[in-house]
Image (spheres, grey):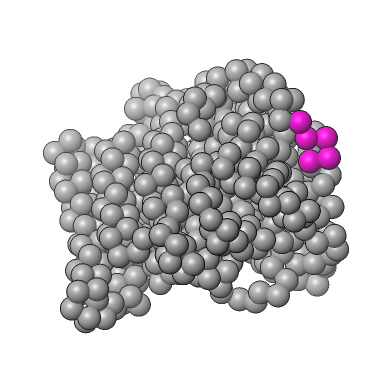
């Protein structure tokens, strides 16, 4: 925890500039070190000390408490977005950074709610209950006795985001120079847009309302409700939802497969009912973004990172499923091309289908099974991803559509959750229950109505 002198520095504009310069130097040295090692390895054959440097990179990012750490967490779960040694280290980043102290909190709350902000609460806990990459959460009680969660953004995050995005661009540029299998330009653009959106807590409050409507019929998924009069662009206040972390829940229910299966089914519906019914997905199934109630119900807690998809994109997801199930190559090609892939030859189609068969595998088999079945340990899908990567490099590479960033993030992140749960479910049946009445025009109508109601922007360029 920072002392009062550090916190005073944060509030001073000159010190903020100094902090940004230190931030650039700290991360820049790590990224620059990666660049030097890559050049040495590729040009001079000196060898890439990936183990040492990836650990240093994780340490630098973890101490920043900012969006580059968040981006790293996302990138770490997207196959081939980063070299595997870096992904493995960055995957360990969690939302457990030390929280900022009480002096910081008082100043930030005064800025957001005015000088008499404390009179708007019966109580407000001085110590944060959770500290993440963009802000920290405090428990409070309002004047009516309702328990609240107040998420307060760290200072100067707008500047921090822009600084981080420049570093991300540098990192992607380095990666692209020595590996042509994946063109990451669309990935960078997608991360840029989503990270900037996450800074707007009023937007997140609207997203929360949208999710409350989309999941209104889901009895086993709980969504908090924002408190408008205690919410600003940098502070979001919502009712408190009791629950424990997934890992703690698993630990206390290790011998109960039935309840673990129920949690898995609740998580599946929490993420995919909004996608297949409204074309919206929660892009960050991070362990800190949901909790589990004693009865296995799921609390969704963070709505800063969502993605709205055109109805035709969702149709493509279902078309590819049926293309694989029916061995219908024309339908599979149609799905890929609807997303912007260029299928120039049979080998490219076969290569993309390797990854598609892995992702869709649990859905294609009409039986109870674990999510990964024959795969044990390691990063989810790493072996398959590596095989696809090598083939794509030989074929000249691909440029993944930007929509795939959060789709892959959700699929891989949820796969990891299901692995932790050791759930044994008929995923095929779950999926078919969701898509049995799918109509992309009906989805478009539902989506347009819901997005307009909560003033969530409709994508104009997909």
Magenta stretch: helix, strand or loop mostly: loop
State the image coordinates of residue 208 (x, y, percent, origin top left).
Answer: 60, 32
Question: From the viewer's perspective, is 174 left or right of 211?
Answer: left
Q: Position of residue 307 (x, y in %)?
A: 55, 37
Residue placed at 61% from the left, 76% from the top?
377
Q: Nearer the viewer, residue 141 or 378?
A: 378
Viewer-nearest residue: 104 or 33: 33
Q: Can residue 437 be seen in the rendering of this structure?
A: yes
Q: Which residues are magenta?
A: 435-439
Q: Residue at x 45, y 45 (%)?
A: 136
Q: On screen, 112 above or below 406? A: above
Depicted 36 relative to depicted 396: above or below = below
Q: Is residue 268 visible?
A: no
Q: Nearer the viewer, residue 337 or 139?
A: 337
Q: Is residue 297 left or right of residue 102?
A: right
Residue 217 is covered by the magenta coloring: no
Image point (74%, 25%), residue name:
442
What residue is drawn where x is 63% and y is 28%? 210
């Amino acid at each position: 925890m920072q002392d009062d002198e550090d916190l005073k520095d944060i509030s001073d504009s000159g010190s903020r500039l100094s902090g940004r310069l230190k931030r650039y130097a700290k991360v820049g040295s790590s990224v620059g070190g990666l660049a030097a090692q890559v050049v040495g390895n590729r040009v001079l054959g000196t060898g890439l000390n990936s183990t040492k440097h990836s650990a240093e990179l994780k340490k630098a990012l973890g101490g920043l408490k900012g969006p580059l750490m968040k981006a790293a967490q996302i990138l770490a779960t997207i196959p081939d977005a980063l070299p595997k040694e870096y992904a493995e280290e960055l995957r360990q980043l969690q939302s457990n950074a030390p929280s900022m102290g009480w002096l910081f909190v008082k100043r930030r709350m005064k800025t957001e709610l005015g000088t008499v902000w404390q009179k708007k609460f019966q109580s407000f806990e001085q110590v944060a209950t959770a500290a993440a990459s963009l802000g920290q959460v405090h428990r409070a009680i309002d004047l009516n006795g309702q328990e609240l969660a107040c998420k307060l953004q760290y200072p100067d995050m707008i500047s921090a985001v822009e600084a981080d995005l420049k570093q991300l661009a540098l990192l992607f540029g380095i990666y692209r120079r020595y590996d042509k299998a994946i063109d990451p330009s669309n990935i960078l653009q997608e991360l840029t847009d989503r990270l900037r959106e996450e800074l707007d807590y009023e937007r997140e409050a609207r997203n929360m309302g949208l999710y409350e409507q989309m999941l209104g019929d889901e009895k086993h998924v709980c969504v908090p409700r924002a408190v408008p009069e205690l919410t600003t662009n940098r502070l979001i206040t919502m009712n408190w939802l009791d629950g424990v972390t997934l890992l703690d829940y698993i630990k206390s229910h290790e011998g109960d497969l039935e309840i673990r299966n129920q949690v898995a089914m609740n998580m599946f519906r929490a993420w995919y009912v909004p996608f297949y019914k409204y074309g919206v997905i929660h892009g960050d199934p991070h362990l800190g973004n949901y909790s589990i109630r004693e009865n296995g119900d799921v609390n969704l807690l963070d709505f800063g990172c969502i993605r709205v998809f055109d109805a035709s994109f969702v149709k493509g997801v279902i078309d590819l499923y049926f293309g694989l199930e029916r061995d219908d190559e024309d339908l599979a090609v149609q799905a890929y091309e609807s997303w912007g892939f260029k299928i120039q030859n049979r080998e490219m189609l076969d290569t993309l289908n390797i990854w598609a068969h892995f992702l869709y595998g649990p859905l294609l088999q009409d039986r109870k099974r674990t999510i990964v079945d024959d795969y044990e340990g390691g990063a989810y899908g790493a072996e398959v991803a590596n095989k696809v990567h090598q083939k794509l490099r030989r074929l000249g590479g691909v440029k993944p559509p930007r929509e795939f960033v959060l789709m892959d993030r959700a699929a891989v992140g949820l796969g990891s959750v299901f692995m932790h749960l050791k759930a044994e479910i008929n995923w095929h049946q779950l999926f078919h229950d969701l898509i049995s009445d799918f109509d992309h025009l009906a989805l478009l109508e539902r989506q347009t109505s819901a997005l307009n109601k909560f003033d969530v922007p409709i994508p104009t360029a997909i």
